[in-house]
Image (cartoon, rainbow, N blue to C red):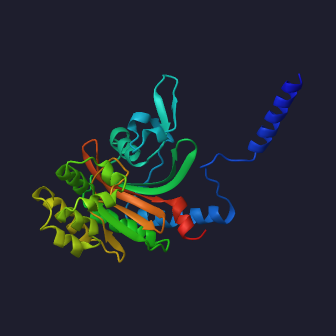
Amino acid sequence: MEQQIKFLWRLTVTNSILEHEIPKGSRLYFGKTARAKREIEQNISSVLFNEGFEEIVTPNFSFSGHQSIEDDTKLITISDESNNQVALRADSTLDVVRIITKRLGRTTNHKKWFYAQPVFAYPANEYYQIGAEWIGHDNISDVINLTTKTLGAINVNASLQISNINLLTLAAQELNMDMSMFRDGEVAQLFNLNIEWLTALLYVKNVEDLKKCKALVPSSMESEVQSLIDVASKVDYDKVIVSPLYYSSMRYYDGICFTVVEGNFTLAKGGAYSADDIKSLGFALYTDNLLKVLGV
């Protein structure tokens, strides 16, 4: 009886503590921070509306087979009443494209869409994003310039890193090595291979560096190097870093991709991808990190 009373007491105390706590990884915004978050969303939305984008809000849940993230163990999944596995939204990009092309295709021909909504990761993490998808468009320079324009609207001038996932794939094939070497950032081991063209690519910082590399890389990589040169040359921004062998964690990017960083914070990611055989472009801004670099 005494043990039972102690157990019930501990349970009551635990419930009392958890009553005013939130799970680790969850987001709570109030007062000044909530207002700043809303202003960021409004300022960026205004830019996107002016550029001809329409807003979409997708369901928080989708069938887990439609999610596309690097690590499936990060999905928060449950079973519906028909025993189908559904997951909390882990990424908005393919959800937007799938819904527009498969579900709304007969009711709209619009190709430019944006969203401001959270994504979720196991066990209880949530991340707010503002993103845009340009369905059927293939000029990645347009989307990169649009990304920097949205950042300018909230007075953020961070470093823009541009890469080409196809160069990474071709380099791994030429070296007969697994992509994990690039994914895990084993740069020292790559330098130790002492291969002229590889070392040159690892040292690239700008378009001029990359132009010098074109004569050194294997013939299989020349066209992708030129593609990266062409795109980077059309970007109207003063803090561009060209990183031809940077690994993107978004598994659906299949060409030029880019990342915006400030210190240790990733502020945006974007790139070219194919969904249902439709070439498209998109980017996502990470609202939580934007608030941090803005000092809110």
Residue 122 lies, with reference to residue 294, above or below; the image says: above
Quadrant position of the N terminus in the picture: top right
Determine whether, in the image, residue 264 is placed left or right of residue 245. Answer: right
Quarter of the picture containing the C terminus is bottom right
| Quadrant position of residue 259 | bottom left
Q: Is residue 65 left or right of residue 257?
A: right
Who's the residue at 31% across and 51% down the image? Answer: 181
Say which residue appears at 14% left-offset and 61% top-offset: 222
Residue at 43%, 39% (x, y): give it: 72
x and y percentages locating residue 174 in the rendered image = 17, 52
| Above-or-below relation of 258 to 22 | below
Q: Quadrant of residue 171?
A: bottom left
Instruction: Provide residue 175's location: percent of width, then percent of height.
Output: 20, 52
Residue 124 in which image quadrant: top right
Do we see residue 111 in this rendering? no
199, above or below 19, in the image? below
Q: Say which residue appears at 22% left-offset and 75% top-offset.
A: 208
Q: Position of residue 74 (x, y in %)?
A: 48, 41
- Nearer to the camera, 156 or 8: 8
